Amino acid sequence: MKEGVLYSENQYLGRDRVWISVRLVLVLFCFTAFYLNLDHLISSQLFFIVGVGIIITSIVMMYMVLFRTEVFQDHILISGLWSTRVVKIDLASITKIEKAPYSTFFFNNPVYNLHTKGKIKFFAGGKNAVFLTDKDGLTYVLGTQRQEELYRIIMETKGRLGKS
C-alpha cells in the first residue's frame, strides 16, 4: 500500500454480475447453435470459435482494473485504466457527502470520468455509490463495492480536515 493511503479499492471491468450473465447467455447460444447444426457445415464452427472467444474475453476482463479509488488525508485520488487521466478530488472543497444506490436501472455500463448533467461518474459494477458535492455544485458519483467503509473513511477524513 502507498504511504498515507487510508482506503484503497480496485474496480474491475468484467466483474459485474449482470454483464457476466449476458456474456454467458451469448456463449450458451453459440454452443447450442454449434451443437444443433444438423448439417455439420464447416461454417457452423464459427459459433464454436465465437463462444470460445467470448469466454476468453470474459476471463481477461475479470482481471482488468477499470479504476482505483484511494483516499488520502486531504484528497481522493481516482486513477483509471492505462492512458486515462488521474482525477484528484480535494476533500476541503467537499460540502456534502451521502451514500445512495448508484442507479435504479438494472443494466449500468462501466464508466470512468463521465461528465453528465453536473455529475462526474465513476462506476464499474455493483449497486452502491458515494455522492460527493463540492463548493461549485458539481457532484462526484463514486461507485463502490464497499459503500459503508468508503463513506466512513471519507467522513472521518473530512472531520479531521475541519478540526485543523
Image: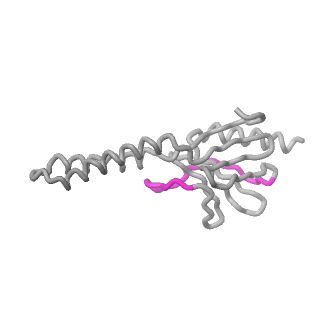
Residue plotted at (67% across, 48% down): 78
What residue span does the magenta drawing correspond to? 93-111
Please name the colour scheme applied to the rendered image: one colour
Q: Position of residue 97 (x, y in %)?
A: 70, 49
Residue plotted at (27% across, 46% down): 28
- Left or right position of 149 against 164: left
**Residue 30 is a magenta residue:** no
The residue closer to the viewer here, 66 or 47, is: 47
Q: Residue most toward the front?
A: 42
Residue plotted at (52% across, 53% down): 110
- Left or right position of 159 against 105: right
- Left or right position of 28 against 148: left
Q: Quadrant of the N terminus?
A: top right
The residue closer to the viewer here, 39 or 76, is: 39
**Residue 103 is a magenta residue:** yes
Q: Position of residue 96 (x, y in %)?
A: 73, 53
Residue plotted at (64% across, 59% down): 120
